[in-house]
Image (cartoon, rainbow, N blue to C red):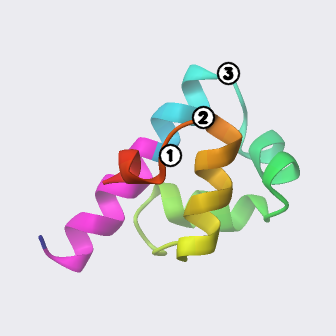
Amino acid sequence: MGIRKLRNDIGKKLKNLRLEKGLSQEKLAEYSNMSREHISCIERGKNLPTVETLYNLATYFEIDIKDFF
Protein backbone atom coordinates (compact mmCIF):
# COMPACT_ATOMS: atom_id res chain seq x y z
CA MET A 1 0.00 0.00 0.00
CA GLY A 2 1.46 3.34 -1.02
CA ILE A 3 1.34 6.43 1.16
CA ARG A 4 -1.04 8.21 -1.23
CA LYS A 5 -3.53 5.33 -1.05
CA LEU A 6 -3.19 5.24 2.74
CA ARG A 7 -3.95 8.98 3.01
CA ASN A 8 -6.95 8.61 0.70
CA ASP A 9 -8.32 5.55 2.51
CA ILE A 10 -8.05 7.18 5.93
CA GLY A 11 -9.65 10.35 4.58
CA LYS A 12 -12.59 8.47 3.08
CA LYS A 13 -13.12 6.54 6.29
CA LEU A 14 -13.07 9.72 8.37
CA LYS A 15 -15.53 11.44 6.05
CA ASN A 16 -17.87 8.44 6.13
CA LEU A 17 -17.77 8.31 9.93
CA ARG A 18 -18.42 12.03 10.17
CA LEU A 19 -21.37 11.90 7.77
CA GLU A 20 -22.85 8.84 9.51
CA LYS A 21 -22.99 10.91 12.71
CA GLY A 22 -24.47 13.86 10.81
CA LEU A 23 -21.56 16.14 11.70
CA SER A 24 -20.19 19.05 9.75
CA GLN A 25 -16.44 19.47 9.50
CA GLU A 26 -16.81 22.44 11.83
CA LYS A 27 -18.53 20.37 14.53
CA LEU A 28 -16.03 17.53 14.25
CA ALA A 29 -13.19 20.04 14.49
CA GLU A 30 -14.75 21.50 17.61
CA TYR A 31 -15.25 18.09 19.24
CA SER A 32 -11.78 16.83 18.30
CA ASN A 33 -9.90 20.05 19.09
CA MET A 34 -8.59 20.43 15.52
CA SER A 35 -9.19 23.07 12.88
CA ARG A 36 -11.81 22.58 10.19
CA GLU A 37 -9.06 23.02 7.62
CA HIS A 38 -7.09 20.12 9.12
CA ILE A 39 -10.17 17.87 9.04
CA SER A 40 -10.75 18.87 5.43
CA CYS A 41 -7.15 18.11 4.45
CA ILE A 42 -7.30 14.68 6.09
CA GLU A 43 -10.60 13.86 4.37
CA ARG A 44 -9.22 14.91 0.98
CA GLY A 45 -6.08 12.82 1.45
CA LYS A 46 -3.82 15.87 1.61
CA ASN A 47 -2.61 15.25 5.18
CA LEU A 48 -1.73 12.00 6.89
CA PRO A 49 -2.90 12.23 10.49
CA THR A 50 -0.54 11.35 13.31
CA VAL A 51 -1.11 8.24 15.39
CA GLU A 52 -2.26 10.50 18.22
CA THR A 53 -4.82 12.19 15.97
CA LEU A 54 -6.09 8.82 14.72
CA TYR A 55 -6.35 7.58 18.30
CA ASN A 56 -8.35 10.64 19.34
CA LEU A 57 -10.68 10.33 16.34
CA ALA A 58 -11.13 6.59 16.92
CA THR A 59 -11.98 7.29 20.55
CA TYR A 60 -14.50 9.94 19.57
CA PHE A 61 -16.18 7.66 17.01
CA GLU A 62 -15.97 4.67 19.39
CA ILE A 63 -14.06 2.51 16.93
CA ASP A 64 -10.73 0.73 17.08
CA ILE A 65 -7.85 2.68 15.55
CA LYS A 66 -7.20 -0.22 13.17
CA ASP A 67 -10.61 0.45 11.58
CA PHE A 68 -9.01 3.40 9.76
CA PHE A 69 -6.86 0.91 7.85
Q: Is residue 58 left or right of 32 when viewed as pictured?
A: left
Which range of residues does the magenta coloring cover?
2-13
Tell whether label 1 touches label 2 (CB within 8 Å): yes
Q: Nearer the viewer, residue 10 or 60?
A: 60
Q: Give coordinates of residue 11: x percent, y percent.
A: 43, 54
Q: Main secondary structure of the magenta part?
A: helix
Residue designated by label 3: 22
Residue designated by label 2: 18
User: In the image, what residue occupies the spot 63% across and 36% down?
Assistant: 61
**Label 1, residues with CA under 10 Å away: few <14, some 14-19, many ≥20:** many
Q: Is residue 6 magenta?
A: yes
Q: Give coordinates of residue 9: x percent, y percent.
A: 30, 54
Q: Quadrant of residue 1?
A: bottom left
Q: Is residue 14 above or below residue 55?
A: above
Q: Is residue 27 above or below residue 19?
A: below
Name the kind of residue labelled 1 in the image: Leu
Q: Give coordinates of residue 12: x percent, y percent.
A: 38, 46
Image quarter of the C terminus: bottom left
Question: Which disc is residue 14 wearing?
Answer: 1
Name the kind of residue labelled 3 in the image: Gly
